[in-house]
């Protein structure tokens, strides 16, 4: 599967989940690995 196909599927099927405010119900904390973010070039 190509990148554009995967992103289109994510947009079409994933967006409703992301936009649902109830998705974070019960979440107290998120785990982020700052060393992975640094290796990827993100700030």
Image (cartoon, rainbow, N blue to C red):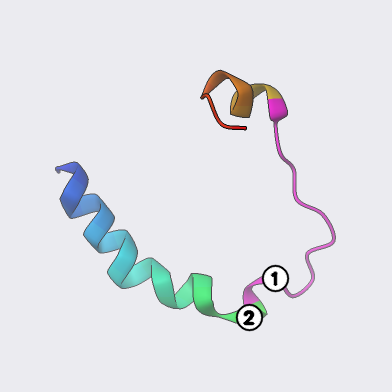
Residue 32 against residue 16 in the figure, above or below: above
Q: Say which residue appears at 75% left-offset and 50% top-offset.
A: 30
Q: Can you give x and y, in whole percent of width and height, for residue 8 in the image?
A: 23, 61
- Residue, disc 1: 24
* SS type, badge 2: helix
Q: Residues within 10 Å of mark 1 (few under 14, many from 20)?
A: few
Q: Can you give x and y, in whole percent of width and height, for residue 39 in the image?
A: 56, 18
Q: Can you give x and y, in whole percent of width and height, for residue 1 in the image?
A: 14, 43
Residue 27 against residue 33 in the figure, above or below: below
Q: Say which residue appears at 53% left-offset and 24% top-offset.
A: 41
Image check: 30 left or right of 6? right
Q: Residue furthest front?
A: 43
Q: Can you give x and y, in whole percent of width and height, for residue 2 in the image?
A: 14, 42
- Residue, disc 2: 21
Q: Is residue 32 magenta?
A: yes
Extent of the magenta region: 23-34
The answer to the question of whether label 1 and label 2 lie on touching residues, with beta carbons closer than 8 A, is yes
Q: Say which residue appears at 43% left-offset and 78% top-offset.
A: 16
Residue 38 against residue 13 in the figure, above or below: above
Residue closer to the observer: 3 or 25: 3
Residue closer to the observer: 43 or 22: 43
Residue 10 against residue 31 in the figure, above or below: below
Q: CA distance from mark 1 to mark 2?
A: 7 Å
Q: Residue furthest top?
A: 39
Image check: 36 left or right of 24? left
* SS type, badge 1: helix
Q: Say which residue appears at 65% left-offset and 81% top-offset.
A: 22
Prevailing SS of the magenta stretch: loop
Q: Residues within 10 Å of mark 2 (few under 14, many from 20)?
A: few
Q: Is residue 33 magenta?
A: yes
Q: Quadrant of the C terminus?
A: top right
């Amino acid at each position: 599967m190509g990148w554009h196909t995967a992103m289109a599927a994510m947009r079409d099927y994933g967006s409703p989940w992301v936009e649902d405010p109830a998705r974070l119900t019960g979440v107290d904390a998120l785990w982020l690995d700052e060393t992975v973010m640094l290796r990827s070039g993100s700030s």
